[in-house]
Image (cartoon, rainbow, N blue to C red):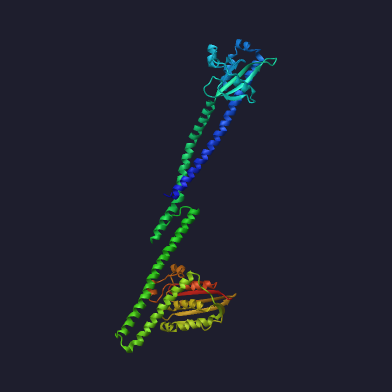
Amino acid sequence: MKLKLFNKYFFTTSVIIIFSLTIMMIILSFVLNNHITNTKRNTLTIACEEIGEYVSESYENAETIAENDFFSVLNSVSNVAEADLFIADTTGKVFACGCAEWQENARCVHSTVLLPKEEINKGLNDEDKLYLGTLSIYQKPHYVSLNAVEDNSGVHYATVIATAPVSLVTNLLRTVTKLFLASAFLPLALMFIFIYIMTYRLTKPLKLMSQASKAMAKGDFSRRIPVTSDDEIGELSLSFNMMTNSLSQLEGMRKSFVANVSHELRTPMTTISGFIDGILDGTIEPKKHDYYLKIVSSEIKRLSRIVESMLNVSKIESNEFNLHRELIDFRELLCKIVISQEQNIVSKNLDIIGLDTISDVSANVDRDLMHQAIYNLVDNAVKFNCQNGNISFNLIKENKTLILTIKNSGDGIPEKDLPFVFERFYKVDKSRSNSKNSTGLGLYITKAIVTAHSGTISVASKPQEYTAFKITLPVL
């Protein structure tokens, strides 16, 4: 089973922290062990040296040491050094010890056996005069430090021995480790709680995005991600919401487009089929054939326009616009397009303004594509105009830029719809658009054509007064 992002992030972060603390603990233990060992080494060495110097300066031989009250000095140094401190002769026999048992009985566990000469000689010959051993007294290894005591003539007559159990160092190290772990528990607990909260906050938007994506795959575009920060996650959430809004709008337009195209295709096809069947089966009289065949021809042209629009959209989306530029006169192009709309203009009694006074302006463009783009604007200006309205044209050239403005009277476009008029499938008034054979693709195609020519197109409108489209093109 794959770990989810939350578990993976939390687990990875926890492992890194635990691993780091373990490494720190190992390093700390190593440093502490060396420090404590060196400290104990120095303590034992100094104790042996101090006692050795004291004995060498105060007593001539082993007998004089044993005969004098030297035990209190050994006991005091032994307690301070936290070590067993005793003195042996050259045979390995302990004749003085700093432990409490010796003070009471003049003998102790250290004096019950002869100390092995090989261990004593090893310690005396060692440069550090410190080693691990048992001296045949202890069951477990002890740190052993030795110092030779010599008389005035340089004869070795006694050895000062200081021992401390290794467990003393390990117990101290264990105590420090427990103290470290105990003091680290609360910070660790707070750290893991903080990591848990941070991990949850970081992964929650991603989890919501995953759920929203699955919902979108099923057609539900209603979910949005709460934006709770201004960092990268917040920006991602905001971008995701914007994407969802766009997809939601696009899905709505797609459904509307499919419904509109289905209606547009079904209506002429039903008309064509009905009239053709009527002619073939004799329902329609021969003298009316021409009349109905003209209707069939009109409906076929209407189907052709719908299919052509859909093909153009396909070309736009696949970047298959191939421009075949040539120098054309825009005044002539406008006149031809207006003449092609003469019947519709006359039926609405529209007044054409400015077309007869505009100057000749030429530009290198694709004739067919530019004809389609401007035809769409003029066709909209006629269709969405009011009875007895007007259409005005303005064409000028400024700084090697062609500027064409087409303005018509009419209901206009609501301000809330202006940002979307160039979106594909978008219709300002669906009920009115259906009656005017619109598929919501004209302005989308127009903008794509103008953009392909490195130009721009914009729209301005005032409800119940006018709508104006402005095209700017470079004059190449």
Determine whether 360 is above or below 51 in the image.
Answer: below
Residue at the (49%, 39%) spot, across then down: 187
Residue found farthest to the front = 118
414 or 112: nearer the eye? 112
**Rendered location of residue 14, percent (x, y):** 48, 43
Outermost bottom residue: 287
Exactly how many numbered labels are in the figure?
Answer: 0
In the image, residue 440 lies at what x, y percent?
42, 72
**Quadrant of the image occupied by residue 69:** top right
Quarter of the image with the C terminus in it: bottom right
74 over 235 or under it: above or below: above
From the viewer's side, name the closer residue of 304 and 414.
304
Q: Nearer the viewer, residue 380 or 30?
A: 30
Residue 123 place in picture, x, y as percent: 61, 23
Look at the image and tell me whether residue 96 can be seen.
yes
Instruction: Examine the rendered structure and indicate whether residue 393 appears above or below residue 286.
Output: above
On the image, the x and y values in percent for residue 361 come to 56, 80
